């Protein structure tokens, strides 16, 4: 697989009509000095001095970059209230990994919220993979001010085995159920690891002791590209077939409307619209409501 050729082709996505204007606006952003970067639950960016017209330009582009799925971000006093309170997931998982001096990848990194959080642990290298030019534009918007060394690749999980570097830690959060061949996706993750490396995986699950899988007829929770939702037993079997040696359950958590909900910074619906209005234990289609299992997979 020729990744160089793929990169060249995907950079052309910046010329898409709905993206080109946003990319041009990025070039007009002010270069501010004395930037302070604070990590609380939000990614907070401050400066000692900012002019009114600079602030207005930044706020206008932030609004034009909707929808903001992951976050939140606090940008010079403007709070970007993303659909997901991503710190809930990050704070849940943080006790289970150590990234110091490690080469780290985040597959399906969205706008890079988790990557910006990971900087605190001082990894050797951080690379985000996401084949979305919109999310890359959001990342470039935030990184214009932070100027981090994070690399953003317009690539997906299928490109990982062919990537120029292997990784010590790979995060794959909320991706597996979007793959029509989950075992191949797991093999790609394993092939992207260095010896002794591990994967932090998050995926939808259904209850049950048997190795069964839910296959939605059309949509799951109004999401069209959800293919397979396994029991933990089935997920474990997938990982065995992908030749992972270790399978450790870290956490199990139901998705609720505190973690995922509609805000003014997104467009369209959110979790409250995806559930049965008469029974919140079911999706609108009648399937079990979203529940996630977090696992650590050893190579």
Image: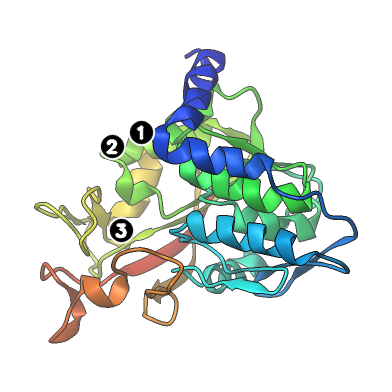
Mark 1 lies on residue: 184
Query: Could one spot residue 299 in this view of the protein?
Result: no
Residue 1, compared with residue 259, is above or below; it is: above
Q: Position of residue 250 (x, y in %)?
A: 51, 67
Query: Could one spot residue 151 in this view of the protein?
Result: yes
Identify the disc placed on residue 233.
3
Q: Position of residue 278 (x, y in %)?
A: 12, 87
Q: CA distance from mark 3 to mark 2?
A: 17 Å
- Left or right: residue 111 compared with residue 49: left
Q: Nearer the viewer, mark 3 or mark 2?
A: 2
Work out whether mark 3 precedes mark 2 in sequence or the reverse, and give the earlier one: 2
Q: Position of residue 273 (x, y in %)?
A: 23, 74
CB within 8 Å, label 2 to label 1: yes
- Left or right: residue 34 compared with residue 253: right
Q: Position of residue 151 (x, y in %)?
A: 67, 38
Identify the disc placed on residue 234.
none
Label 1 environment density (alpha carbons within 10 Å; few <14, some 14–19, many ≥20)? some
Q: Is disc 3 placed on a helix, strand or loop?
A: helix
Residue 162, compared with residue 157, is above or below; it is: above
- Left or right: residue 129 compared with residue 271: right
**29 vs 4, nearest the viewer:** 29
Picture residue at 40% right of the left edge, 45% below the top? 239
**Position of the C terminus by quadrant:** top right
Q: CA distance from mark 3 to mark 1?
A: 18 Å
Residue 96, compared with residue 8, is above or below; it is: below
CB within 8 Å, label 3 to label 2: no
Q: Is disc 1 placed on a helix, strand or loop?
A: helix
Work out whether mark 3 precedes mark 1 in sequence or the reverse, and give the earlier one: 1
- Left or right: residue 272 compared with residue 37: left
């Amino acid at each position: 697989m020729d990744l160089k050729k793929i990169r060249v082709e995907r950079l052309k996505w910046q010329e898409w009509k709905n993206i080109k204007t946003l990319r041009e606006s990025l070039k007009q952003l002010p270069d501010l000095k004395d930037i302070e970067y604070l990590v609380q639950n939000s990614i907070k960016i401050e400066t000692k001095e900012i002019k009114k017209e600079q602030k207005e330009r930044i706020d206008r582009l932030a609004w034009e970059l909707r929808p903001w799925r992951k976050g939140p971000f606090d940008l010079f006093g403007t709070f970007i209230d993303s659909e997901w309170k991503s710190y809930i997931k990050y704070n849940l998982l943080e006790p289970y990994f150590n990234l110091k001096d490690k080469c780290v990848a985040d597959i399906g990194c969205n706008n890079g919220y988790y990557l910006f959080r990971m900087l605190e642990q001082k990894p050797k290298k951080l690379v985000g993979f996401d084949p979305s030019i919109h999310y890359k534009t959001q990342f470039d918007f935030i990184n214009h001010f932070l100027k981090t060394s994070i690399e953003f690749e317009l690539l997906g999980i299928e490109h990982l085995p062919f990537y120029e570097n292997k990784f010590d830690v790979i995060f794959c959060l909320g991706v597996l159920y979007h793959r029509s061949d989950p075992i191949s996706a797991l093999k790609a993750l394993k092939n992207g690891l260095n010896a002794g490396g591990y994967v932090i995986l998050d995926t939808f699950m259904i209850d049950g002791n048997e190795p069964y899988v839910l296959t939605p007829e059309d949509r799951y929770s109004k999401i069209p590209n959800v293919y397979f939702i396994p029991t933990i037993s089935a997920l474990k079997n997938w990982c065995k077939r992908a030749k992972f040696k270790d399978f450790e359950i870290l956490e199990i958590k139901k998705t609720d409307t505190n973690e995922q909900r509609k805000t003014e910074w997104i467009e369209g619906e959110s979790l409250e619209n995806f559930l049965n209005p008469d029974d919140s234990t079911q999706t609108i289609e009648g399937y079990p409501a979203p529940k996630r299992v977090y696992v650590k997979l050893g190579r």
